[in-house]
C-alpha cells in the first residue's frame, strides 16, 4: 500500500540515518571488508610473488574441472533436498513434522571427513551399510570413492545449509499466494513450481552458495574419498611446490568469488520479511504420499545421521569395552571446543551485523563489497587461511604479540565462517520495521537503550540462527585450530584428527560422538529454542 | 620451489647457531629460561607425549608441544622464521621430507656433534641439520584371506607384475610414500624409479590419503596388498584383532624395505639450543629408544639399540634412507615423477 | 471505467448459479459455519455481510474449495462440487477468487499475473493459443482500466490498482463464479469508495455470478443485489438492501445494517391488519405506539430470538419510561421500537441535551441525552447547526417503524 | 470511554502551540512540502487533510523531527526546534507520535510498551520513580479503557485496541504535542468509526495540542477543531469543517471536502452586497444565478486559481448549457455554481434520467443524466426509492451557494 511504502522510504532517508555521519556509514563496512579480505589478498599476493600461476595451470585444469563438477552437483542436489524437506516439514501434514524439523538439521554437526570415514567404515564388511545392503540382497560396493562418493557424502552433510533458510522463508510466505494459484487452475505441484519456488529463490540461492563454498574448500572428505580436487592440489604440493599450491588456492578463491558475485547479482531484490500469513496455511494433505515422504526423510536422516553415528559407535564401543579409551581425556577439549565456538559465534554476529545493516538499510557499492568480502572468507581452504592469518599476524607489529593466542584464533574462525551469519543477519535487520525504530526514538532519547530494548530483541531470532551456523562450523574446524591455537590447546576436532591420523579409530569414534552430542546440545539450547527456524 | 621469504633471513641463517660441545652436555649457558622447551611435533601426541613426560620427570624441564601435521608445521615454522618470530625450539617430524624442506629454506640450526654421533650416519643429515630417532620400515601389508604367503613378491619391483593389477593400495600424496620413492631414486636412479612408478601405475593401484587408510582397506579386503610403513598394521590389529592383515617385509637391500626415519631438528633462531639438544639426546637415550621400540613398534636408531622383539633385524648399511640434498629437484622432483607416472591423489 | 469498451472475451460464457445446502465448516471440531443454505442466482451479486469472525471467509472458501465442509453440499451451476462422497479440487471448479490483499504474484509483471490463469491447461477443456492469451490479457487489463501497466511489477502499483489487477486476473479465465473476500478492506477510505464503484461497474458489465464478503454495511448495500447477513456462523436474513434496512428480521440485523435507536414505547391503538399491502403476504400486525418521540406507527414482530443480543457499538439502547401521566402504563403492552437516526427530527425546545456533534458536511449526527438520561442518535441534513450543550426537542418523522415486544 | 475518571497525571502540563513558518521539505531536490505556514493553537486539534502524496506525512514528520526541513522554521511552544542553524533531535522535542499501524513493540507487553517512554532520563528534567511509572502506566491504560490488558502482547489485541495502546504510549510521557499519522486508516470501516469516536473523547479530555494526518474528509471533520487542506505540498485553506464544506475557498477544496456538482449558470440579478453579514468582513458579492436546477442564490468568488484542477473522482463536472429560450446567454456572465448533492431534491417528472442508485439505508445517492447529457449527483433521505432508468425532475433546495466565474 502506498502509505506504507512512503513511510518506509521516508524512514530510509530519514534523520535516523543522517545522524550517522556518512563517513562512519561507509567506513565501518569498508573496515570490516578490509579485515575479511586480508587472507584472500595475501593468497593472491603470495601467488603473484611466487609467480607460477602460468606454468601451474596445466596441473590445475583437471582438478579445477573436477572441483566444479563436484561443487555444482553437490550444491544442486543439496538445493533440491533442502527445499523439498523444508516444504514437507512446513507446508504439509507430514507425520511428526516438528521431530523431523530438528532431526534433519543435525547432519550439519558432523565434520565432513569424519562423515566420509564413517561411510567408508560403514561399507566395510560388518559395517552398518554393508550389512543393511546385504540384508536386502545387494552386495556393498568393494570400493567407496571417487566423484559419486564425494557427491553423496558432501551432500548428506551440507543440505541443511539450504534447509534452514528455506524453512525460515516458508514461514514468511503469504499462504494465499498458493491459494490464488490453485483458484487459477494450477495443481498443487504446478503451484509449487510456478509460485512458491520463485518466492524461495533468494533463500535457496543463498543456501546453495554456502554449500558450494563448503564443497570447493573442503579437503577432509575429498581426500578420504580419493576425489582429486583443487584443495588436494593445495595440500599435496604445499611443501614441495608452494607456487603450485598457492596457485591452486588462488584458483579456488577466484572461482568462489566469481560464484558469490553471480549469486549476489542473481538473488534479485530481497523480499521484505512480512509475516503476512493472514490466516494459517492449511497444511497440504499428503494422503498416500505420506509414506514416500516419510521414507525420504528417513533415508536422508539415515545417511546423514544414523550411518555415521552407528559406525562411530561401533568404533568407540570396541575401545571402551577394552578400556583403551575413556571420556576422561575428552573433558578439557570438550570445554574448550564449546567455549571458543560460542565466543566465535557471538563475535561473528557482532562483526557481520554492521555489514548486514549496511546491505539492507543503505545498499551501496561499499556495502556490497563488504558482503562479498565476508562471504569470500568461507572460500579459502582452511589450511591456507590459517597460514595466511599466521603470516599477517606475524608481520603486523601491532598483532604479532597476539600470535597463537585465543583472540587471533577466534578472529580466524570469524573470518572463515562469518559469511554463514550474513544471510540470517540480513533478514534479522529487515525484521525491524522503520517505524518501530522511529517511535522508539520519539519515546527514548538514549540510543543504547533503544538498541537493546527495540532493535536487538526484534533481530534476535535471525541473529541467533546466524550465530548458530557459525557455532556449528567452528565446533568442527580443524586446520586453523591446529596452527593458530595457543600451544597445548586442543579441541574435539583436533582430538578426532590426531587419533584418526594414526588409526586410533576407537578414540576417533568416541571423540566424534562427543562432538556430535555437544553440537546437538548447544544447537538445541542456544539456537533452536530461541530462533524461529523450528517454530512456525 | 624456491621460497620467496628465504633470502630475507638467509644471513642470520648462515650465522645460524651452531651449538658447541660443552654447552650442550651441561645445559649451562643458554637463553633466558632453560627450564622449559617448546616443540612443534608432527609425531602424534599419543605416540610421543609419554616419553616427553619422562623427560620432564628426569630433567625438571617443562615441555610445551604443538601437535599437527609435519608438513603444516614445517610451513608454519618457515613463516615464523621468516618473520623472525620462531615459537619453537625443536621440530619433530614424521618424515624426512619436512625436515628437508626446512633445511633447504635454512630454518634449521646445526646439531652438536655428540648428538649426531649417537646414530649411524645413514639416518642423519650430512650437514648435521637433523637427526633420526626412530624408524619405520616400508613393508607390504596384505590381506591374509585374499593373498597366500606364497604369492607374496620378493621385491617391490615385482609389484609391476600384471598379476597385481588392481590389487595394490598406495598413498601417492603421503609423505612416507614420497620419501620411499625419493630413496629409490637415490639408490636406483631416476630412470629405474620412473619405470617402476609407471609399471605400478599400469597396474592401476588404488590411491589412499595415508598409510592407516591403506591398512584399513586391506583389512576389509578393499585391496589385497598395500605399500605402507610397518607399524600401522600393529595398531590396526590392536583396534580390531579380527582384522585379517599382516606385514610382509622385503629383504633389507630391496628399495621396498627403505627405512623412513622420524627426525628431530633444532630450529634456527631458538634461544635455548642447549635444552633443545638435551631433549633430542634424551629421545636417543636407551630409555627413549626402548620406549619407541616397545610402544610404537618402531626401530630404535641409536647405535647399539636392539630392534623390537617381533621385528626382523635391520642392517643400516643395507637399507636405503632418504637423503634429499644429493638429489636433483629433491622432493618436488619426486612428486613430479609420481604425478607424471599417473599415480593420482 | 464505465467508458471502457465492452469486451466480449471477458464476459463469462455461463453465469452459473451457486447453491449451498446445509453447509457446515468446522476447524478442529469448532463450527465456524453452521448449516448454511443459500442460493445465489446466476449473474447476480450477493454480499455475505457479518461481523468479524462470523464465518464469512470460511463460507466463501468452502465455495472455492479451499476449505472442506464437514457437512452439506455445494453446487456450482448444475455440477455438485462438494458433498458427501463428492469433492472437486479448487483448481477444477472454474471459480475465480480475489483475496483481501490481492495476493498478486510479486515475481510476475501485471500482464504475467493476468496471463497466469490462462496458461493453466484444460480450462474449459481446451488450451489457449499464445496470441489468444495476449488478447485476453489486454482485454482484461482494459476492462479494469489498467491497459498501460502490463509490464509493471505489483509492488510498483497503488493498493487500488493492485486490487483491480487481482480482479482482472480472476476474470480473465472466464470463471463461472467470482468470489471476493473483503476485496476493498485493505484500501483506505477514499480509495475504497472509488475502487468499489469501479468494481461494481465491471461486475455489472461482465455479469458474472459474484459472491463477496464484507463486514461493511455500506459496501454490502452499494455492491450487492442481495445481501445475506451472517451471524455466528448462521444466516440471519437474506434480502435486498432496502429489505434489510427498512424491514430487518431481528433487532440484531436492524442494528448491524445501520445505526438504530431502540425506543421503548407502549402499544396504544388496537392492532389493525392494514400493513398487509405494504409488507406483502404474511405481514406482522400494525398499530401505533406512544413513545417519548410522540406517536409512532409500528408493525409488530414476534418476540425476537432472545439469544441474539444487540450488536455492540451500533445500538445505543434507549430505555424510555412510558409517559408519566399515563396511569395504565404497566398494563399496556411495552414494545421496543426501531427508530433510525435520520427519522429523528430536531426542533427548538428544551426536551433534550446535545451531548455530541459529528459534522459530516452533507449531514450532521447528534447524540442527545433525553430527560430520563437515556441517549438517542439523530441525523439531519438541515443546515442549521446545534452545538454541544444546546437544548432541543425531538420528534419521530418517518413511516411505519418496526417494533418488537420489549 | 467518557465514563473514564479524569486522570490528572495524563493531562499534559502545558498544551504547547505549534507554529510552522515557511516550512519546505524536499527529497533529493523534489519538494514534497512547499513553504507551509501554519499555527496550531495550544490544546486544539488540527487535521492535515489532503489526497495521497500531497505531503501530509512529510509535514508531520518535519514537526516530529523525523525529516529535516530544507527551509522554514518549526516552533513548539516557545522553543524553536528546527530552522536555520537550529536543530533539536526528535527525541528531545517532547512530541508524541502515533503511527498508522500503531508501531507497538511486538516483544513487549502492553504495559511495557506504555512504560517504554517513561523510563527515558530527564523527561521534563527529572527521572520518574518505579512506583510513579506504574501509576502513570495504569492511568494511561485506564484513559484508553484498556486497564485489564496490561500483560497482553500486542498481537493478541484487535487493531482498534492496538491503536489505543499506541495512543496511551504516546500520551504517557505527557508530550507537549501529539502527532497522529492516519491513525485509523489501518482499521476497517466499522472499527474505524468507533475507535475514532473513542480517540476524539480521549483527546478532548487530555487537551493536548494535536495534529493529525488524514485523507478522509469524514475523519478530518469529525475529529478536527480546525482543518488544514493540503494540496501538492501547499495549504489551500484552513478553517473549521463548516467553513470548508459550506464556504470552500476554491473549487478544488469544494470537491475534496465533499461531493460537489459544478452547475453552469448565468448570473441574472445585478450583484448586491447583502451577504456581508453572513460571510463576515470582506465577503464576495452575492446574487442569483439561472441554472437547470432553477434560480440559485450565489455568492461569487474571484476567478479561482486556474492551476488547481478538480480533484479526480469527487466531482462529476456538469456542463449545463444556459436555458435555450434566453437569447442573451453569451453576453450574460457565465458562472459555475457549487451544488452539493444533498441540496438537489427530486420530484416526479421527466427532466432527468436515473443512471445509478447507491442505497446506503439512511440515505440514497442517485446519479442523474440531465437532458443535455451532463450528469448530476443527488442525495436524499426520502424513503421513496427511484430505480435505475426512472425519470425525475430536479430542483435546488438550499441556502446561498458558492460560485466561480466559469
Ligand atoms: N523518503 C522519500 N524519498 C523520496 N520521496 C518521498 C519520500 N517520502 C515521501 N516522498 C514523496 O513526497 C511526496 C509526499 O509524500 P508524503 O508521504 O508526505 O505524502 P502523504 O500526503 O503522506 O501521502 P499518503 O497519504 O499516501 O501518506 C510524495 O510524492 C512521495 O512520493
Ligand atoms: N484455519 C483456522 N483454524 C482454526 N480456526 C479458524 C481458522 N480460520 C478461521 N477460524 C475461526 O473460524 C471462525 C470464522 O472465521 P472466518 O475467517 O470465516 O470469519 P470471518 O467472518 O471471515 O472473519 P473476518 O471478518 O475477521 O475475516 C473464527 O472464529 C475463526 O477464529
Ligand atoms: Mg474473513
Ligand atoms: Mg502519509
Image (cartoon, coloured by chain):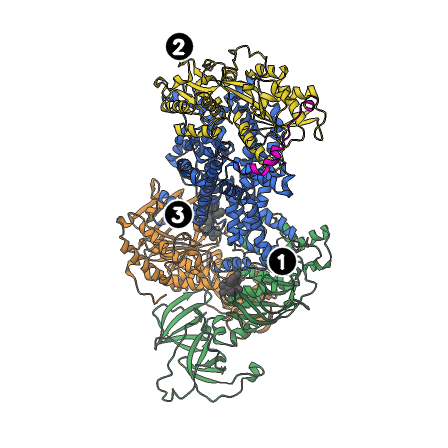
Chain colours: A blue, B yellow, C orange, D green
Q: Is residue A89 left or right of residue B27?
A: left
Which one is in front, D278 or D219? Answer: D219
Task: Inspect this view and state whether residue C51 appears.
Answer: yes
Magenta region: B1-23
Frontmost residue, D143 versus D257: D257
Percent across and percent down for residue B2 are 51, 35
Q: Is residue A284 above or below residue D237?
A: above
Chain hosting mark 3: A
**Residue with the mark numbered 3:** A195
Instruction: Give the residue at mark 2.
Output: B150
Question: Cα distance, mark 1 to mark 2?
Answer: 91 Å
Question: Which residue matches tag 1?
Answer: A442
- Location of residue D224 (image quadrant): bottom right
Instruction: Mark 1 vs mark 2: tell me if same chain.
Output: no
Front position among marks 1 and 2? 2
Rendered residue at 50%/43% (across/down): A376
Which secondary structure, mark 1? helix
**SS class of the residue under badge 3?**
helix
Chain where mark 2 sits: B
Q: Where on the picture, by quarter, is residue D44?
A: bottom right
Amino acid at each position: 500500500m502506498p502509505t506504507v511504502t512512503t513511510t518506509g522510504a521516508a524512514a530510509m532517508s530519514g534523520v535516523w540515518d543522517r545522524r550517522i555521519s556518512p563517513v562512519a556509514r561507509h567506513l565501518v563496512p569498508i573496515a570490516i571488508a578490509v579485515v575479511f579480505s586480508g587472507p584472500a589478498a595475501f593468497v593472491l599476493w603470495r601467488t603473484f610473488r611466487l609467480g607460477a600461476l602460468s606454468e601451474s595451470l596445466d596441473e590445475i585444469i583437471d582438478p579445477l574441472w573436477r572441483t566444479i563438477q563436484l561443487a555444482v552437483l553437490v550444491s544442486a542436489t543439496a538445493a533440491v533436498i533442502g527445499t523439498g524437506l523444508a516444504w514437507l516439514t512446513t507446508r504439509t501434514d507430514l507425520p511428526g513434522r516438528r521431530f523431523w524439523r530438528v532431526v534433519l538439521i543435525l547432519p550439519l554437526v558432523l565434520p565432513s571427513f569424519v562423515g566420509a570415514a564413517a561411510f567408508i567404515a560403514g561399507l566395510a564388511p560388518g559395517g552398518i551399510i554393508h550389512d543393511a545392503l546385504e540384508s536386502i540382497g545387494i552386495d556393498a560396493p568393494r570400493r567407496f570413492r571417487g566423484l559419486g562418493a564425494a557427491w553423496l557424502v558432501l551432500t548428506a552433510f551440507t543440505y541443511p545449509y539450504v534447509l534452514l533458510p528455506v524453512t525460515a522463508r516458508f514461514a514468511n510466505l503469504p499462504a494465499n499466494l498458493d491459494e490464488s494459484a490453485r483458484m487459477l487452475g494450477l495443481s498443487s505441484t504446478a503451484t509449487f513450481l510456478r509460485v512458491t519456488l520463485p518466492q524461495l529463490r533468494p533463500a535457496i540461492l543463498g543456501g546453495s552458495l554456502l554449500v558450494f563454498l563448503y564443497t570447493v574448500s573442503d579437503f577432509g572428505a575429498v581426500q578420504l574419498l580419493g576425489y582429486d580436487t583443487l584443495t588436494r592440489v593445495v595440500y599435496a604440493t604445499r611443501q614441495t611446490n608452494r607456487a603450485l599450491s598457492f596457485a591452486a588456492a588462488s584458483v579456488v578463491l577466484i572461482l568462489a568469488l566469481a560464484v558469490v558475485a553471480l549469486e549476489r547479482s542473481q538473488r534479485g531484490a530481497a523480499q521484505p520479511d512480512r509475516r503476512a500469513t493472514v490466516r494459517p496455511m492449511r497444511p497440504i494433505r499428503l494422503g498416500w504420499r505420506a509414506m514416500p515422504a516419510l521414507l525420504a526423510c528417513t533415508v536422508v536422516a539415515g545417511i546423514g545421521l544414523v550411518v555415521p553415528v552407528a559406525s562411530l559407535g561401533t568404533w568407540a564401543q570396541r575401545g571402551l569395552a577394552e578400556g583403551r579409551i575413556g571420556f576422561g581425556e575428552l573433558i578439557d577439549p570438550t570445554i574448550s571446543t564449546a567455549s571458543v565456538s560460542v565466543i566465535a559465534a557471538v563475535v561473528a554476529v557482532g562483526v557481520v551485523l554492521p555489514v548486514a545493516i549496511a546491505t539492507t538499510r543503505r545498499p551501496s557499492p561499499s556495502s556490497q563489497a563488504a558482503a562479498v568480502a565476508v562471504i569470500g572468507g568461507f572460500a579459502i581452504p582452511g589450511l591456507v587461511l590459517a597460514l595466511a592469518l599466521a603470516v599477517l599476524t606475524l608481520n603486523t607489529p601491532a598483532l604479532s604479540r597476539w600470535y597463537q593466542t585465543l583472540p587471533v584464533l577466534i578472529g580466524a574462525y570469524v573470518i572463515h565462517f562469518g559469511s554463514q551469519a550474513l544471510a540470517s543477519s540480513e533478514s534479522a535487520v529487515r525484521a525491524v520495521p522503520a517505524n518501530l525504530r522511529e517511535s522508539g526514538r520519539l519515546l527514548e532519547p538514549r540510543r543504547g537503550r533503544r538498541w537493546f530494548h527495540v532493535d536487538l530483541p526484534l533481530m534476535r531470532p535471525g541473529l541467533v540462527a546466524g550465530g548458530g551456523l557459525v557455532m556449528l562450523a567452528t565446533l568442527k574446524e580443524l586446520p586453523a585450530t591446529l596452527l593458530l591455537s595457543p600451544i597445548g590447546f586442543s579441541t574435539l576436532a583436533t582430538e578426532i584428527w590426531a587419533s584418526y591420523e594414526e588409526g586410533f579409530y576407537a578414540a576417533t569414534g568416541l571423540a566424534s560422538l562427543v562432538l556430535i552430542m555437544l553440537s546437538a546440545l548447544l544447537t538445541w539450547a542456544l539456537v533452536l529454542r530461541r530462533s524461529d527456524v523450528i517454530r512456525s | 620451489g624456491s621460497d620467496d621469504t628465504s633470502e630475507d633471513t638467509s644471513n642470520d641463517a648462515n650465522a645460524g647457531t651452531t651449538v658447541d660441545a660443552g654447552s650442550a652436555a651441561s645445559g649451562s649457558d643458554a637463553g633466558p629460561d632453560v627450564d622449559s622447551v617448546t616443540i612443534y611435533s608432527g609425531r602424534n601426541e599419543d605416540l610421543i607425549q609419554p616419553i616427553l613426560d619422562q623427560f620432564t620427570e628426569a630433567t625438571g624441564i617443562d615441555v610445551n608441544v604443538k601437535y599437527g601435521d609435519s608438513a603444516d608445521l614445517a610451513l608454519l615454522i618457515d613463516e615464523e622464521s621468516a618473520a623472525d618470530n620462531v615459537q619453537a625450539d625443536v621440530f619433530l617430524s614424521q618424515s624426512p621430507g619436512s625436515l628437508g624442506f626446512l633445511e633447504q629454506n635454512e630454518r634449521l640450526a646445526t646439531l652438536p656433534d655428540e648428538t649426531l654421533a649417537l646414530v649411524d650416519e645413514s639416518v642423519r643429515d650430512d650437514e648435521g641439520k637433523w637427526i633420526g630417532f626412530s624408524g619405520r620400515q616400508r613393508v607390504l601389508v596384505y590381506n591374509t584371506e585374499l593373498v597366500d604367503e606364497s604369492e607374496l613378491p620378493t621385491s617391490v619391483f615385482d609389484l609391476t607384475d600384471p598379476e597385481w593389477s588392481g590389487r595394490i593400495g598406495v598413498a601417492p600424496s603421503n609423505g612416507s610414500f614420497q620419501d620411499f620413492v625419493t630413496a629409490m631414486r637415490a639408490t636406483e636412479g631416476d630412470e629405474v624409479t620412473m619405470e617402476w612408478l609407471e609399471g605400478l601405475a599400469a597396474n592401476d593401484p588404488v590411491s589412499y590419503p595415508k598409510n592407516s587408510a591403506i591398512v584399513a582397506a586391506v583389512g576389509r579386503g578393499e585391496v589385497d596388498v598395500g605399500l605402507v610403513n610397518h607399524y600401522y598394521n600393529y595398531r590396526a590389529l590392536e583396534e580390531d584383532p579380527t582384522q585379517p592383515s599382516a606385514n610382509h617385509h622385503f629383504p633389507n637391500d630391496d628399495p621396498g624395505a627403505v627405512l623412513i626415519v622420524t627426525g628431530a631438528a633444532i630450529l634456527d633462531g631458538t634461544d635455548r639450543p642447549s635444552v633443545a639438544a638435551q631433549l633430542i639426546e634424551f629421545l636417543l637415550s636407551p630409555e627413549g629408544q626402548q620406549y619407541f621400540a616397545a610402544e610404537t613398534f618402531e626401530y630404535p636408531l641409536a647405535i647399539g639399540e636392539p630392534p623390537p622383539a617381533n621385528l626382523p633385524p635391520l642392517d643400516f648399511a643395507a637399507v636405503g634412507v632418504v637423503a634429499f640434498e644429493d638429489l636433483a629437484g629433491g622432493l618436488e622432483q619426486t612428486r613430479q615423477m609420481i604425478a607424471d607416472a599417473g599415480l593420482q591423489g | 471505467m464505465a467508458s471502457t469498451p465492452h469486451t466480449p472475451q471477458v464476459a463469462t460464457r455461463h453465469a452459473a448459479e451457486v447453491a449451498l445446502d446445509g453447509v457446515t465448516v468446522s476447524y478442529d471440531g469448532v463450527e465456524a459455519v453452521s448449516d448454511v443454505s443459500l442460493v445465489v442466482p446466476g449473474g447476480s451479486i450477493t454480499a455475505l455481510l457479518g461481523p468479524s469472525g462470523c464465518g464469512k471467509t470460511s463460507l466463501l472458501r468452502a465455495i472455492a474449495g479451499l476449505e472442506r465442509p464437514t457437512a452439506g453440499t455445494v453446487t456450482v451451476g448444475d455440477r455438485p462440487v462438494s458433498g458427501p462422497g463428492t469433492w472437486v479440487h479448487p483448481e477444477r471448479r472454474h471459480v475465480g477468487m480475489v483475496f483481501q490483499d490481492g495476493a498478486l504474484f510479486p515475481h510476475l509483471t501485471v500482464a504475467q499475473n493476468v496471463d497466469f490463469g490462462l496458461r493453466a491447461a484444460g480450462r474449459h477443456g481446451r488450451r489457449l493459443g499464445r496470441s489468444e492469451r495476449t488478447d485476453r490479457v489486454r482485454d482484461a487489463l482494459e476492462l479494469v482500466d489498467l491497459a498501460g501497466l502490463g509490464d509493471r511489477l505489483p509492488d510498483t502499483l497503488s493498493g487500488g490498482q493492485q486490487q483491480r489487477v487481482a480482479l482482472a486476473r480472476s476474470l480473465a479465465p472466464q470463471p463461472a463464479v467470482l468470489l471476493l473476500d473483503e476485496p476493498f478492506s485493505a484500501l483506505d477510505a477514499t480509495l475504497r469508495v472509488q475502487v468499489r464503484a469501479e468494481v461494481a461497474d465491471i461486475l455489472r458489465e461482465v455479469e458474472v455470478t459474484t459472491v463477496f464478503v464484507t463486514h461493511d454495511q455500506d459496501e454490502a448495500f452499494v455492491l450487492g443485489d442481495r445481501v445475506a447477513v451472517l451471524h455466528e456462523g448462521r444466516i440471519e436474513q437474506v434480502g435486498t438492501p432496502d429489505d434489510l434496512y427498512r424491514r430487518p428480521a431481528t433487532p440484531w440485523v436492524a442494528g448491524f445494517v445501520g445505526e438504530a435507536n431502540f425506543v421503548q414505547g407502549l402499544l396504544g391503538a388496537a392492532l389493525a391488519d392494514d400493513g398487509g399491502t405494504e409488507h406483502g403476504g404474511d405481514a406482522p400486525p400494525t398499530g401505533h405506539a406512544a413513545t417519548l418521540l410522540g406517536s409512532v406507527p409500528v408493525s409488530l414482530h414476534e418476540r425476537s430470538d432472545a439469544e441474539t443480543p444487540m450488536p455492540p457499538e451500533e445500538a445505543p439502547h434507549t430505555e424510555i419510561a412510558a409517559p408519566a401521566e399515563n396511569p395504565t402504563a404497566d398494563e399496556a403492552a411495552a414494545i421496543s421500537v426501531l427508530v433510525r437516526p435520520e427519522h429523528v427530527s430536531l426542533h427548538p425546545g428544551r426536551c433534550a441535551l446535545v451531548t455530541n456533534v459529528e459534522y459530516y458536511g452533507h449531514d450532521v449526527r447528534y447524540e442527545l441525552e433525553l430527560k430520563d438520561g437515556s441517549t438517542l442518535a439523530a441525523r439531519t441534513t438541515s443546515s442549521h447547526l446545534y452545538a454541544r450543550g444546546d437544548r432541543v426537542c425531538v420528534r419521530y418523522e418517518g413511516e411505519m417503524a418496526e417494533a418488537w415486544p420489549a
